[in-house]
Image (cartoon, rainbow, N blue to C red):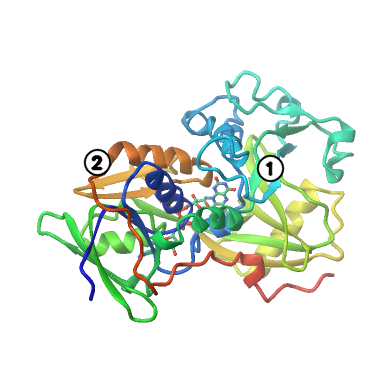
Amino acid sequence: MAAPHRLDVLILGGGAAGLWLLDDLHRQGYSAALVEAGALGSGQTIASQGIIHGGLKYALNGKAGSAARAIRDMPLRWRRSLAGEVEPDLSGTRRRAEYCCIWAAAGMRSRLGLLGASLGLAVKPIPLNKETRPSLLQDWKGPVLRLGEQVIEPGSFLQILADRHLSRILRVDGPQGVDIKASPTGEVREVALRCPGGMEMIVQPDQVVLAAGEGNSRIRNRLGLPVEHIQRRPLQMVMLRGEMPAMNGHCIRNASPWLTITSTRDHADRMVWQIGGQVAEDTARSTASVAINRAREDLARALPALDLSTVQFATYLAERAEGTSSGRRPDRPTTFIDGNVITVWPTKLALVPMLSDMIQKDLKPPANHPAFQGPKGWPTASVAIPPWEMESSWTAAH
Ligand SMILES: Cc1cc2nc3c(=O)[nH]c(=O)nc-3n(C[C@H](O)[C@H](O)[C@H](O)COP(=O)(O)OP(=O)(O)OC[C@H]3O[C@@H](n4cnc5c(N)ncnc54)[C@H](O)[C@@H]3O)c2cc1C
């Protein structure tokens, strides 16, 4: 085996959080490498709806609480990156939509138009008239607002970041391809890596960032670190495929987010919708047909103009992995520091830039290690395949 590689920072996990951090650290002169146990973003990022939230969803009661305040600057920050005006330059990322819309199925139709004005949110909703609404909401009896929340294609975003760092992204042979050796005081000084072909290498990082999503629990367990402040929230997301128009937005009910709809196109250029929100939480442990029936009922109320007669349905299971200090749903990124190990969860894709800033404040400045290049022949990781391309059991339209 070759001599150990000295590094400033070793990142475990190549989802949105790990890749964004790798890009930031590399630009700042850190010698950094990222280890991925499977496909990049294969936990949550590839399953996500790609909405760069600006907080309105959390301020529906008319108050900008801490969740809304934490996230309110993110849409502008992403918009500038997506336009290539600031680093990371994400200008090649495919955008599903430049804006989302928001409309109320019940409970607050009359107040919806006033929302946002008094909340101090950076992204204020703009009322849409009949002509400028999405086609499915043209005859909706109640206000429809436009929100400056962009929707990105998560796979394309991951690819843009990964392409810049191929020689610094090391694919390992599943979670067991990483063997972390901690000192009795909990400091990680050496990590043995094994790639799918059997090649091995040793890295000696000054600091380690665990950005492995739900995989963080397993790594922390192995290191003997506490795992009780980690929560997982299962979801069953519903997908539609067919000849629907594009639709990106939130339908709210009784001042709570109810249905979140995003749309994309599959490899055969068919329209695909992802449906999240209450249905995904309520049916997380039900069968796919229960989730699909519930989505049909909800869609009939939220979008009565939608014709479902030729639409196919499928579902996929996903799990949100988050750190929490209070047992409640967190509203900002979480970081835990244990010796030279920082464990991180962004909580939301939209909050990934904020998380990267937080981690950088906790890292020691770079030492003078040479810039990292993976050994010749070591495989890099590819981006995960989105759920609608994996799913084979679409229900026939009826
Ligand atoms: C269905 C769904 C919809 C969502 N929609 C939105 C949305 O619209 N907007 C929004 O802001 N947020 C959304 N989120 C939340 C958002 O997706 C997540 O907060 C974010 O993607 C988490 O990124 P991550 O990098 O921490 O984790 P992940 O994307 O899960 O990445 C973790 C990576 O670590 C790797 N890994 C695991 N174990 C190991 C190991 N032992 N060693 C090395 N690598 C390992 C995994 O293979 C994976 O690539 C959604 C989440 C879900 C589940």
Among the 4 quarters of the image, the one containing residue 365: top left
Q: Is mark 2 within 8 Å of ligand 1?
A: no
Mark 2 or 1: in front is 2
Nearer to us in this view, 84 or 58: 84
User: Residue 287, image x and y in percent?
Assistant: 61, 70
Tell me the SS state at disc 1.
strand
* Residue pointed to by mark 1: 250
- Identify residue type, mark 1: His
Among the 4 quarters of the image, the one containing residue 312: bottom right
User: Residue 113, image x and y in percent?
Assistant: 74, 25
Q: Is residue 113 left or right of residue 333?
A: right
Q: Is residue 393 left or right of residue 366?
A: right
- Identify residue type, mark 2: Lys
User: Residue 387, image x and y in percent?
Assistant: 61, 66
Q: Is residue 193 left or right of residue 244?
A: left
Among the 4 quarters of the image, the one containing residue 187: bottom left
Tell me the SS state at disc 2.
loop
Q: Residues within 10 Å of mark 2 (few under 14, many from 20)?
A: few
Name, please, the residue furthest toward the top. Answer: 118
Q: Residues within 10 Å of mark 1 (few under 14, many from 20)?
A: many
Asked if residue 332 shows in the view, the reply is no
* Residue pointed to by mark 2: 364
